Image (tube, rainbow, N blue to C red):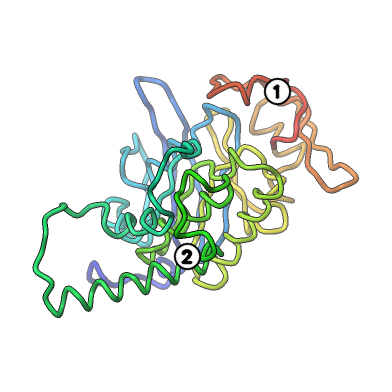
């Protein structure tokens, strides 16, 4: 089998870790992680701060070597799969003074790695630019941003900005989309709207979506599976399989209770305090909150 040929199993798998372990600066981040993300699946990576969620994303992007075990992305080593991955890192909202237009932000997904050297406008160049403009318009329409894509990004709401950033990550036709906390700065309606958008992208374009989140509740009803990281380990499966009192108690090594409210939200009670904090939004009581 050549490097371009994939086995039937690889052809249906977007990402796979087998007995994967990572250490950073002599500290264990996670150990013996086993997980599989299928093609076209929508998967959330959950867990407290410092559990290794972003480290897992870096390993899948080929930016961080494993101490042991193996990782494959789209049937290849991660570094060989990067061209087929769309990545949206953690971010803060754009300042109101940011004047770049939304459409130009999306275009950076195509042009961001090119040198700014003028080229002769040959027939082939014109044809390529026309095709690129068509693709940019297509992904802007896909994310529902056509009505405001020509406005300055700093004038837009957080939800509108996030849709355009998702379009930027989609513009190169990725097979896997990795998003690190894309719901973080959004209000609840926009969180639900972006979650629904990502579900549609999975279904209509068969793009696998791997999303890091602190709260599973805005994603309920859209996910195929969750990966929950805590205590240096991870477990995966459906929401109903993973976010249970028994499963989380085993993962954390301490009694955890999972409750479901009358409106369907999941509440984790007894979660140990996370070892790291990223900001004031985490400076609340970690012993009872809506962050499974």
**Position of the C terminus by quadrant:** top right
Residue under the image location 56 percent in, 64 percent down: 144
**Label ID, residue 140:** 2
Residue 108 rendering spot, x and y as whole percentages: 32, 54
Task: Tell me the element at label 2.
Answer: helix
* Residues packed near mark 2 inside 10 Å, few (<14), some (14 to 19) or many (20 plus): many
Q: Would you place residue 96 above or below residue 287 in this image?
A: below
Q: Earlier in the sequence, mark 1 or mark 2?
A: 2
Select label 1 or label 2 by which is in front.
Answer: 2
Observer-nearest of 196 and 102: 102
Q: Mark 1 to mark 2: distance in Å?
A: 38 Å
Q: In the image shown, does 89 or 142 lie closer to the viewer?
A: 142
Q: Position of residue 36 (x, y in %)?
A: 50, 55
The quadrant of the rendering that contains the N terminus is: bottom left
Q: Secondary structure at mark 1?
A: loop
Above or below, comparing residue 245 to residue 112 in the picture = above
Q: Quadrant of residue 187?
A: top right
Would you identify the image quadrant in which residue 275 lies? top right
| Residue 269 appearing in the image | yes
Q: Which mark is residue 286?
A: 1
Q: Nearer the viewer, residue 267 or 173?
A: 173
Does residue 32 appear in this view? no
> For this view, does 283 lie left or right of residue 66?
right
Q: Are marks 1 and 2 in contact (CB under 8 Å)?
A: no
Residue drawn where x is 36% and y is 25% of the image: 24
Relative to 125, residue 104 above or below: above
Q: Position of residue 152 (x, y in %)?
A: 45, 50
């Amino acid at each position: 089998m050549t490097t371009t040929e994939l086995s039937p199993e690889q052809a249906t798998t977007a990402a796979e870790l087998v007995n994967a372990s990572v250490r950073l600066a002599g500290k264990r981040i996670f150990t013996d992680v086993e997980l599989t993300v299928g093609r076209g699946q929508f998967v959330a990576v959950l867990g407290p701060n410092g559990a290794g969620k972003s480290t897992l994303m870096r390993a899948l992007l080929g930016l961080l070597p494993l101490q042991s075990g193996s990782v494959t992305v789209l049937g290849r080593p991660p570094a060989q799969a990067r061209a087929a991955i769309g990545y949206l890192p953690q971010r803060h909202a754009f300042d109101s003074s940011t004047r770049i237009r939304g459409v130009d932000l999306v275009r950076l997904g195509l042009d961001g790695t090119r040198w700014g050297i003028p080229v002769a406008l040959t027939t082939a160049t014109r044809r390529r630019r026309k095709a690129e403009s068509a693709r940019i318009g297509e992904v802007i329409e896909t994310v529902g941003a056509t009505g405001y894509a020509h406005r300055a990004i700093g004038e837009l709401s957080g939800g509108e900005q996030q849709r355009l950033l998702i379009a930027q990550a989609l513009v190169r036709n990725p097979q896997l989309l990795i998003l690190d906390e894309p719901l973080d700065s959004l209000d609840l309606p926009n969180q639900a709207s972006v979650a629904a958008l990502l579900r549609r992208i999975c279904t209509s374009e068969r793009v696998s979506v791997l999303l890091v989140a602190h709260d599973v509740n805005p994603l309920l009803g859209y996910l195929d599976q969750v990966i929950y990281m805590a205590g240096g380990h991870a477990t995966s499966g459906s929401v109903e399989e993973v976010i249970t009192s028994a499963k989380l108690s085993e993962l954390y090594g301490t009694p955890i209770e999972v409750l479901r409210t009358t409106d369907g939200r999941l509440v984790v009670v007894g979660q140990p305090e996370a070892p790291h904090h990223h900001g004031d939004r985490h400076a609340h009581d970690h012993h009872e909150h809506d962050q499974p």
